Amino acid sequence: MPPVIPTPILPLDIDLLQFALNLEHMEADFFLFASLGRGLDSIAPELAMGGPPPIGARKANLDDTTRLIIEEFGYQEVGHLRAIKTTVGGFPRPLLDLSAHHFAKIMNDAFGYHLDPPFDPYIDTINFLLASYVIPYMGLVGYVGANPNIYGYVSKRLLAGLLAVEAGQDAIIRDRLYQHMHEFVPPYRITVAEFTDRISALRNRLAMCGIKDEGLLVPPELGAEGRIATNVISANPNSLAYRRTPAEVLRVVYGTGNEHQPGGFLPKGGNGTIARELLLVP
């Protein structure tokens, strides 16, 4: 049976799918460097398209199982970059800040005070998983948000494939954190669950769009069917994935709460039509 809309790729499809490259680039270099000590420029330099190397990315001190999982995630992100760029075209990797200093600032903003010592995402497995909690989920909700506006059948197939793997990555990260949720994160007297709750609350504040993000423990009224406080997978009252617009995603990724003001993971702003046009708005 032929598709309802026989056009494989529409112009808006291109802009929305290319917008996702900003997050896919973040994930690719973050996961590759953490697991291998080298990034996209070593694995698939043609996909960087001459973009600047990321700031501060480095190898993480991971246990063997987590290192293999994160290495697999890194290669998956390389595939995502290739799939998007060969289907709808792309742009050079934007400047990325993946430094320990930046992650420390995120955690300070999440808690409302300076953690002492500063949070270091690369120091051990739990810290890295908490840092990973920060990133892939934004790609997931961004894809869910883009889905209603994607019409071409080739574009829809691409988005569905990307969304499925991003959701799987987020679920694995949350599951591995869930197994330690009541443990303190050394050297802080703060549990893993509280870290996730504060990170999610920060993203909700920055996005300015209500609750679209939840930690590993929630009040029972926010749990599945209002019956449970554990929250392995973040979802709305009908257990459907939350969705975010590109503007909401940028408010969080920039760390400024303003899609027109770059910073955070993208110090010079995102690339692509959507991100660049938003930067031009005063």
Image (cartoon, helix red, strand yellow):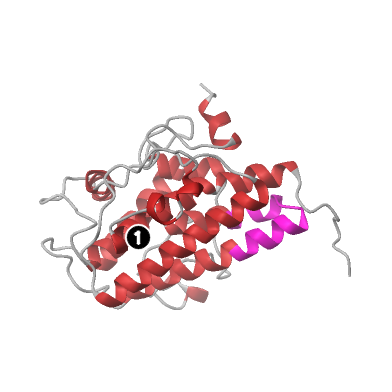
In the figure, 212 relative to 278: above or below?
below
| Nearer to the camera, 186 or 86 | 86
Which residue in the structure is indicated by mark 1?
Answer: 132
Q: Quadrant of the N terminus?
A: bottom right
Q: Does the magenta stretch mainly form a helix, a strand or a loop?
A: helix
Q: Residue furthest right?
A: 1
Residue 36 appears in the picture as rendered: yes
| Nearer to the camera, 233 or 276 | 276
Determine if the magenta segment contains residue 85: no
Residue type for callout 1: Ser
Q: Residue at x 36, y 61 (%)?
A: 133
Q: Residue at x 37, y 67 (%)?
A: 71
Residue 203: x and y in percent read: 40, 50
Q: Residue at x 57, y 46 (%)?
A: 245
Residue 209 appears in the picture as rendered: no
Residue 242: x and y in percent read: 54, 59
| Nearer to the camera, 133 or 267 | 267
Determine if the magenta segment contains residue 151: yes
Q: Secondary structure at mark 1?
A: helix
In the figure, 94 relative to 221: above or below?
above
Name the side, left or right, on which 126 lies relative to 84.
left
Q: Crowdedness of circle 1 by 10 Å Cα count: few (<14), some, many (20+)?
A: many
- Could you say which quadrant of the image residue 198 lies in? bottom left
Residue 195: x and y in percent read: 27, 60
Please provide the residue range marked out in magenta. 143-161
Name the side, left or right, on which 190 lies relative to 240.
left
- Could you say which quadrant of the image residue 228 lies in? bottom left
Q: Residue furthest top?
A: 282
